[in-house]
Image (cartoon, grey):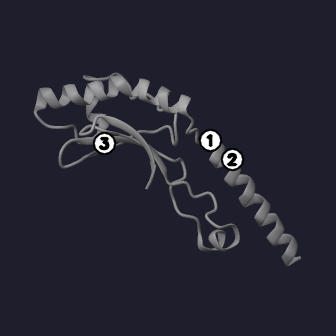
């Protein structure tokens, strides 16, 4: 009975890992699509900065004056994250499952469905990069 229960739990975890990983698209085509949809967002951030002499505290501050809606990135969680840094800002998309696996999942399956990738634009360097945290 216990072995059957553990087998069922293992199957559920493996299936859910493959589903969450397939939801995150990180290929070159998705990265290029994300760069393309980010162009008006980056322009809106820069225009806000020019108008106010400071960067917006959040992306919501851009709506509706600088951009009607936030575009949807084609990679990762499909949601933007934004951070003001010492010298500029970073715009990035994380994996849809950036949290570390539970201890049990780690012991049984290794990393489990933990995915710590991100795709980031650095305003200071003016480049996009794909990396792990």
Asked whether the beta carbons under mark 2 and mark 1 sit within 8 Å of each other, the answer is yes
Measured from the top left, where is residue 7 in percent x and y?
83, 68
Circle 1 residue? 23
Label 3 to label 2: alpha-carbon separation? 29 Å
Above or below residue 110? Residue 21 is above
Circle 3 residue? 90
Identify the residue shown where x is 54% and y is 32%. 28
104 or 65: which is nearer to us? Answer: 104
Q: Residue furthest left?
A: 53
Residue 19 circle label: 2
Measured from the top left, where is residue 26 in percent x and y?
55, 39
Above or below residue 51? Residue 90 is below
- Sequence-wise, which precedes: disc 1 or disc 3? 1
Identify the residue shown where x is 22% and y is 37%. 56
Label 3 vs label 2, nearer the camera: 3
Give the crowd class for mark 2: few <14, some 14-19, many >=20 residues within 10 Å. Answer: few
Q: Is residue 111 left or right of residue 8?
A: left
Label 1 vs label 3, nearer the camera: 3
Measured from the top left, where is residue 90 in percent x and y?
30, 42
133 or 44: which is nearer to us? Answer: 133
Q: Is residue 133 left or right of residue 89?
A: right
**Residue 36: quadrant of the picture:** top left
Element under disc 2: helix
Give the crowd class for mark 1: few <14, some 14-19, many >=20 residues within 10 Å. Answer: some
Above or below residue 80? Residue 48 is above
Element under disc 1: helix
- Sequence-wise, which precedes: disc 3 or disc 2? 2
Measured from the top left, where is residue 84 in percent x and y?
24, 45
Q: Residue furthest bottom?
A: 2
Label 1 to label 3: alpha-carbon separation? 24 Å
**Residue 113: quadrant of the picture:** bottom right
């Amino acid at each position: 009975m216990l072995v059957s229960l553990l087998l069922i739990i293992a199957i559920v975890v493996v299936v859910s890992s493959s589903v969450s990983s397939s939801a995150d698209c990180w290929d070159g085509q998705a990265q290029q699509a994300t760069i393309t949809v980010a162009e008006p967002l980056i322009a809106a951030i820069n225009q806000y900065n020019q108008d106010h002499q400071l960067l917006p505290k959040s992306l919501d501050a851009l709506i509706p004056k600088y951009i009607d809606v936030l575009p949807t990135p084609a990679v990762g969680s499909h949601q933007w994250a934004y951070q003001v840094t010492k010298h500029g800002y970073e715009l990035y998309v994380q994996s849809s499952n950036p949290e570390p696996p539970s201890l049990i999942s780690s012991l049984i399956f290794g990393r489990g469905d933990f995915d710590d990738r991100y795709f980031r634009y650095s305003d200071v360097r003016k480049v996009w990069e794909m990396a792990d945290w």
